Amino acid sequence: MTVRRLGAGLVAAALITPALAACASGTGTTGSTPSPTVSASGTASPSGSPVAGDAKQALLDSTKEISNGNFRFTLAGAGSTAEGLVHQPSQSAAMKIAIGGPSADLAMKLDVIHFKPDSWVKLELSGPTADSLPAIKQLNLGKYQHLDQNRIKGNRNLGFDFEKVDPAGSAVLTQGITEVRSTGTGAYAGTLDVTKAAEAGSLNAATIAALGTQAKTVPFTAKVDPQGRLSELVLQLPAAGQTAAQEVKMTYSDYGAATAAQKPPADQVVEAPAELYSLFN
């Protein structure tokens, strides 16, 4: 197995959104959506649930603060996690990503730092497959590898777009709401159409295609903080083909209170070798 094939198999669409990798290998349970529901067109249910338009608008509005680019976030799916911060005022971002656990045949941990115009990544590949590839030793350096911006331009795996600061693309996801209702103070539930979620960065095209018609009615729950800002969004992806049902969860916190990412110490930095770019391209 070459380094290029290794990268294509593990990370092609999962680096920024590790829940994608989980959707291919983890297990989970499909959440049930309690009744009654209300349609996003604004039709109220017989039980007197809130008008859907009001609930949907509340969720659409809840994502506006994310675009200001000053928050902390987490992403999680079975077997994969990510946490980090975005700090638009300093044009910086940082995230720690883990794909696969200790028992995985191939596991990956990444510590990624962006401080415009520079980016660095510290990579750890482990497991029997990683141990069998001599080229991996050139990447498991225990140091931050400085990235050539010309070589990662447009690469969603290694780059970061400060014009689109939300790693999960919650604004795009909430626009796909098809049914929604309030379930309590600052809490919502319903279904959404994820057929455009590839644009959000939360799901890849292959995952969406595998869902088929189920992609148009994916159950979700959401929470907003006392200021009406999105604090949690959970998708319950149904089983599709060989893929088990999955939960994809994203959270947001520290709006307006995140701090700038820290550049790695100079003595912990090396230039990234060609093998690193091959792994993620």
Image (tube, rainbow, N blue to C red):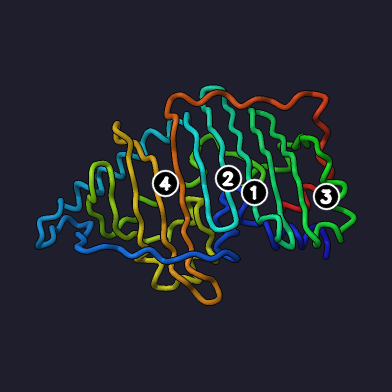
Asked whether the residues under the numbered discs 1 and 4 touch, taking CB atoms below 8 Å apart as contact, a structural biologist would say: no
Q: Tag 4 or tag 1, which sits nearer the N-term?
A: 1
Residue closest to the eye, 56 or 29: 29
Q: Residues within 10 Å of mark 2 (few under 14, many from 20)?
A: many
* Depth order, front residue of 70/46: 46
Residue hosting label 4: 170
**Of the image marks 3 and 4, the number of the one nearer the N terminus:** 4
Against 240, residue 102 (above or below) is above
Front of the two marks 1 and 4: 1
Q: Give the alpha-carbon distance from disc 1 to disc 4, as whole Å.
A: 21 Å
Cβ–Cβ under 8 Å for marks 1 and 2: yes
Asked which secondary structure carries label 3, the reply is: helix
Q: Which residue is mark 2?
A: 82
Q: Which residue is mark 3?
A: 275
> Upstream in the sequence, badge 4 or badge 2?
2
Local crowd size for mark 4, using a 10 Å CA cut-off: few (<14), some (14–19), many (≥20): many
Task: Identify the secondary structure beneath mark 2.
Answer: strand
Find the distance from the CA under tag 1 to the CA under tag 2. Answer: 6 Å
